[in-house]
Amino acid sequence: MGGNLHRAALAMAMAAISGAGFAASREENLADPIIGSEDAVLADAPNVPPPIARDHATKVVVHIEVKEVQGRLADGVSYTFWTFGGKVPGKFIRVREGDLVEMHLDNHPDNKMPHNIDLHAVNGPGGGAAASLTAPGHSSVFSFKALNPGLFVYHCATAPVAMHVANGMYGMILVEPKGGLPKVDREYYVMQGDFYTKGANGEQGEQPFSMAKAIDEKPDYVVFNGSVGSTVGDKALSANLGETVRLFVGDGGPNLTSSFHVIGQIFDTVWAEGNMGSPTHDVQTTMIPAGGSAIVDFKISAPGTFIIVDHSLTRAFNRGALAQLKVPGDTQKLVYSGKTSDEVYQPEGPGARVAEGPGAGAPTAKTKAQRIELGAAVFANNCQACHQATGQGLPDAFPPLAKSDFLNADKARAIKTVIGGLEGKVTVLPSWRVSLRSGIA
């Protein structure tokens, strides 16, 4: 019922939007008078600026400082990011259809490279790239009229463009329709990007950019909001039972298309590719191309931790494209019961005849080295996807096996756990995070 009520409200809101000028032409938006001026309210992911309440077009002044900064890409892995505003992704910009946007791009004097900005919301050659090419220590200014509503990507377009984008130079600008978007309880900003490092995934230390891997489109990391684990644990998104959540989702690329999915949720409404004219409903996974976006709305009908992924799943569980949405509350048994039984399954009954034939026996390990080799194969086939190749786990998602204080405390219990599984509550000491960061695990 919640989804149907949301769609009914959406239909009424879209009708109101249309009556308020949602379908205005570019010419009508161009002719909108500009009343007053204001400084843009910008936000770092996963936050977004508040919805726009005014009912007229104005001049919106946007200041963005380009910074080249060293930061965390993964535990023990640092990287020199090129950023719009000091973080990846860049600042979220929110304006209204018909606004005049005055863009100030400031290139910090400590930077080594010239940079610019190409906003997909601009109707004009290069999206502002030529007008904003800025040397370190300089500032460039240009303006544009927001003629089309939608959620648009912006990025650096200085040559080599793929290198600037791969280093984190992307963000999003929302051009709200004149009547605004349907009201929701929570709004968040999530942007995917692929990173190409000289060292392999997980290799410790400062990692430089690899142009060769970028050209081959073989990223070592695919992440949400700039780093592995950026939006999990105590940094996870949050909502309450019964609330409606809106995600503004972008794909900075530079190369990969995202198969965006929230495990355990169905998107009640999707504005595919960030368009405001033709939403779709009851969507499980939505494709977001590099340089593209989508807006997804869904109602929270059950509590728990919901995993947000690129459903090209090795990117999620092996390269970092994983986030969390945490919802507290009492279990809603009618919505989702959880496991109610666990019984032995015999497809043809205990008396079924089986045509037996000679088969190859399981490989036998005669030496310790052979046992280790067979154990490594078992781990690779069954455990690696979640606990990672070296057993280091994923922070706040999958606990480590390497150097695990829980497993090492009782060898017999550890063997039984591996062979027969483990039931009940397990407490993992928080010190494992320190071990991961120090490279001990």
Image (spheres, helix red, strand yellow):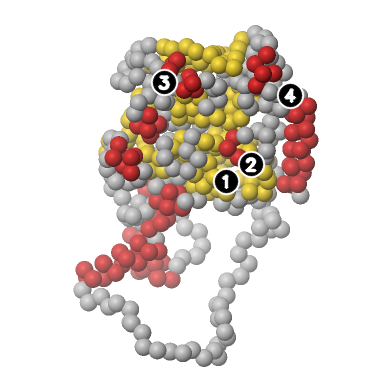
Q: Are marks 4 and 2 in contact (CB under 8 Å)?
A: no
Report the residue marked by disc 1. 286
Left or right: residue 153 versus residue 402 is right
Give x and y (percent) for residue 277: 68, 34
* Cα distance in 3D space between marks 3 and 2: 31 Å
139 over 421 or under it: above or below:
above
Q: Residue at x 35, y 26 (%)?
A: 159
- Find residue 18 and report its image quarter: top right
Residues under labels 4 and 2: Cα distance?
Answer: 21 Å
Which element is circle 2 on?
strand
Tell me where residue 65 appears, x and y as whole percent. Answer: 43, 18
- Where residue 276 sits in the image (x, y, percent)? 65, 33
How crowded pointer 4 is (Cα within 10 Å; few <14, some 14-19, many 20+) is rated as some
Q: Check disc 4 and report the residue beneath it.
A: 21
Q: Amino acid at mark 2?
A: Val
Q: Amino acid at mark 4?
A: Gly
Element marked by disc 4 = loop
Residue indicated by mark 3? 116
- Work out whether residue 267 can be spotted: yes
